[in-house]
Each structure stands twice: as C-alpha cells, then as structure tokens.
C-alpha cells in the first residue's frame, strides 16, 4: 500500500452502502472529466478525451447514477481504516506524513465533493451538475471509527507533520 505524495490520494466515499476509504491515483477522482478537459482546452492544451474515457469505463461524469459502475474498477483499492492507522503508528510512509492525510470526501447520496487536497488540482471545480464542490475540512463528516489519524484523541498526522517541519528547519525535536 505505497502512497506517493501528490500522485496517490486517500479518498473517503459515502453512499447507500456506507463509508469506505480508497487509495488510488489522484486523477481517478475528477468526477466530471468533460469540465476538466474543457478547462485544459481553454488554456491551450490538447486533450485526448477518448483515451481518458477508455481509462474510466467510458464514464465521462461520475455522479449518483454512474458511480457504482465506476467504482467497480477500484474494488481492490478499498483500504480499511485500521490499516491506515497502523501505517501512521508505524510511521510507514515514503517522504512525508502528508501522504496519509485524506484528500477528498465524496458523498454520492448527498451529491457533494469536499477537498483538502494540498496541491494545485481543484477537484471541487469538476463536479457534476447539481453537485456541491468545495475546498474545506471534511473531517467532521467522517464516522468516528474511520478517523484513522486520531489516536487517543490526538491528530497524529498534524503532530508528525509538525515534527517533520521542525526537522526540516534544523530545530531540535523531542519525539
């Protein structure tokens, strides 16, 4: 379960079945690929929509009607909260603890996508018509038992990132 920062992301999905985490490449979660392609074309880039669609089971818009078919592609990418918690406790990450920070929350029943993705892809802009897309902290929507970063009431991702930053600055760190 290797995660590369800014290439792979952790996504929380809620639907009529319940809540689960996925770890996949980040581009898998652009819900409306046509809006995404249009944005790229407007700034002068060429986009091969047919190729992109071939990677998505020919689903251009992932919404409340199409997501079940789309998620079949990613059945093997579902990960248990306990596994993610173990990775944090074991400090099992490649470059930064931020690899283990959740990036997106998608609720297919309420038609919302919330993003905490720290890099420069505005997932919230590429949502289907009639959906709400926003950049905001979504942790309140995650069921308590699935908040893998909280260990004994402490946000371990924030704590470990603070230590990373102190080390980066050359400050003394007591771990």
Image (cartoon, helix red, strand yellow):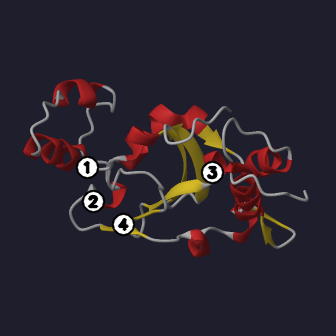
Q: Earlier in the sequence, mark 3 or mark 4?
A: 3
* SS at badge 1: loop
Residue at coordinates 18% horizontally, 41% vertically from top-left? Answer: 37
Numbered label attached to residue 111: 4
Q: Which residue is mark 3?
A: 98
- Front residue of 151/5: it is 5
* SS at badge 4: loop
Q: Residues within 10 Å of mark 2 (few under 14, many from 20)?
A: some
Residue 39 position within the rendered picture, expressed as x and y whole percent measured from the top left: 16, 48
Q: Nearer the viewer, mark 4 or mark 2?
A: 2
Measured in 3D between alpha carbons, the distance from the residue under mark 1 to the one under mark 3, in whole angstroms, is 26 Å
Q: Nearer the viewer, mark 1 or mark 3?
A: 3
Measured in 3D between alpha carbons, the distance from the residue under mark 4 to the one under mark 1, in whole angstroms, is 13 Å
Residue at coordinates 82% horizontally, 73% vertically from top-left? Answer: 153
Residue at coordinates 26% horizontally, 29% vertically from top-left? Answer: 52
Q: Earlier in the sequence, mark 1 or mark 2?
A: 1
* SS at badge 2: helix
Q: Which residue is mark 1?
A: 32
Q: Nearer the viewer, mark 2 or mark 3?
A: 3
Numbered label attached to residue 125: 2
Q: Residues within 10 Å of mark 3 (few under 14, many from 20)?
A: many
Measured in 3D between alpha carbons, the distance from the residue under mark 1 to the one under mark 2, in whole angstroms, is 9 Å
Measured in 3D between alpha carbons, the distance from the residue under mark 4 to the one under mark 2, in whole angstroms, is 14 Å
């Amino acid at each position: 379960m290797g995660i590369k920062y800014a290439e792979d992301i952790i996504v929380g999905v809620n639907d009529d079945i319940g809540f689960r985490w996925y770890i996949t490449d980040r581009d898998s979660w652009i819900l409306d690929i046509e809006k995404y392609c249009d944005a790229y074309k407007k700034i002068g880039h060429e986009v091969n929509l047919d190729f992109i669609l071939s990677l998505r089971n020919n689903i251009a818009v992932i919404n409340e009607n199409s997501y079940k078919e789309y998620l079949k592609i990613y059945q093997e990418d579902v990960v248990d909260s306990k596994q993610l918690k173990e990775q944090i406790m074991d400090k099992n990450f490649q470059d930064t603890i931020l690899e283990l920070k959740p990036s997106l929350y998608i609720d297919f029943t309420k038609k919302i996508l919330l993003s905490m993705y720290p890099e420069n892809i505005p997932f919230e802009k590429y949502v289907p018509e009639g959906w709400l897309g926003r950049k905001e902290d979504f942790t309140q929507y995650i069921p308590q038992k699935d908040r893998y970063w909280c260990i004994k009431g402490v946000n371990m991702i924030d704590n470990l990132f603070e230590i990373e930053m102190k080390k980066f600055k050359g400050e003394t760190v007591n771990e």
